[in-house]
Amino acid sequence: MAFRPLSATVFVASCLILAACSKDPASETEASAAPAASLTVTLARAQLRAIDRTVIASGPVTAWEEMQLGVELSGVRVTALRVDVGQAVKKGQVLLELDHRTLDSDLRQAQAALNEADAGVKLAEVNLSRGQALAKSQLISASALDELRAALVQAQARQATTRAQRDGVQLRRDFADLRAPDDGVISKRLVQPGQVVAAGSELLRLIRQGRLEWRAELAEAELARVQTGAKVILTGADGRPVEGRVRAVSPGLDASTRTGTMYADLPAPGALKAGAFVEGRIVTSAAQALMVPAAAIVQRDGYAYVFSVDAQGIAHRLRVRTGAASGGDIEVVEGLKAGDAVVDRGAGFLGDGDRVHVVTDAAAAGPTP
């Protein structure tokens, strides 16, 4: 009875050994030959196409010309302010009015004096005409006729003097109305109704013609590539592109920074506002470039790679040098030639030597057992 437990143990161990020895060698071979999991990918070919060479720069959006407006009278109170910030105005439109009651009174006095001088001239002309008729009949002396001529000259001189005085008063009266010197948009207001102003002080600012421009600082090498009239592409606050044209390029460089300024007109600035700091692209030239989809470029360890696929469905990693990006594609400067097929969708999941399954439907990209 003491040997029964040992016999049962030996029996179980014998059964396990026999089961292990009875495995089918063919089934082991089939298991080892089962294909490894593959990734379903799509291919794209490197193609030559025209792209724009650009310079990337950043800078502020500013007014093309911002005019500081003020009055030429001192110690006069503002009685009416007819504009506010952001309002579009026309050339000659009244922007603000000063108290002009005293000026109106002076103008009426000057106009009355001019009217009196005009009447004096007319009277002198009539007297001279009569004197000339009487002189023909020898009814007046030559000296009397000379006096009539002198009286006309004196009357004309008084007329010229009073007209100049009237014009001076009229000019001062006109100064009481601040008018827009050109079409534009009011960008700043520094005055309130009832305020007493001084001559020459800034009261309003006007963005002339409402035009904005983009100014960017460029290094010497980049500045040399930019030409007047080149297209500029910015991105507005609403995400929409804003196009402009290079108006001028600085002829010299700043001695301390070794940079120059580029000025670009923005005919339709859209959502861009004066004072915004934005990044933009300046188109310098057009060229042919070898392009592949951006999804085909894989960045690893600080280098750019693409994957090719051989006839056995094995992916091979190729190191490339990239250039400009355009319309969802990236330029390949070195490492490929036109017509080479590279993995597009699914490239980011691949490693060198991975087995892949190539399909034509990009939507099918994904792991396949």
Image (cartoon, grey):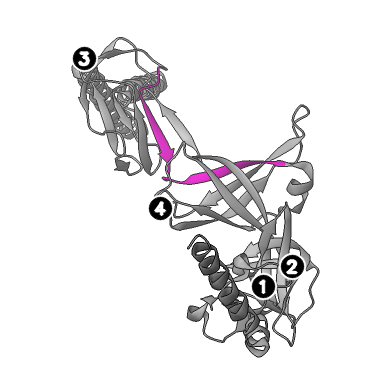
- Give me the disc on residue 270: 4
Q: Nearer the viewer, residue 9 or 256?
A: 9
Type of amino acid under label 2: Val
Q: Which residue is mark 3?
A: 102
Cα distance between the residues tagged 2 and 4: 34 Å
Closest to the camera, between mark 3 and mark 1, is 1
Query: Can you name the residue that lies furthest to the front here?
Result: 1
- List x then y, in percent, for residue 313: 69, 83
Q: Are marks 1 and 2 in contact (CB under 8 Å)?
A: yes
- Give me the disc on residue 106: none
Q: Quadrant of residue 177?
A: top left
**Marked residue nearer the N-terminal end (3 or 1):** 3
Residues in magenta, as a range: 201-218
Q: Which residue is mark 2?
A: 332
Q: Is residue 224 magenta?
A: no
Q: Is residue 95 above or below residue 294?
A: above
Q: Which residue is mark 1?
A: 292
Dot 2: element: strand
Q: What residue sits 57% from the left and 40% below the top?
A: 59
Type of amino acid under label 4: Gly
**Marked residue nearer the N-terminal end (2 or 3):** 3
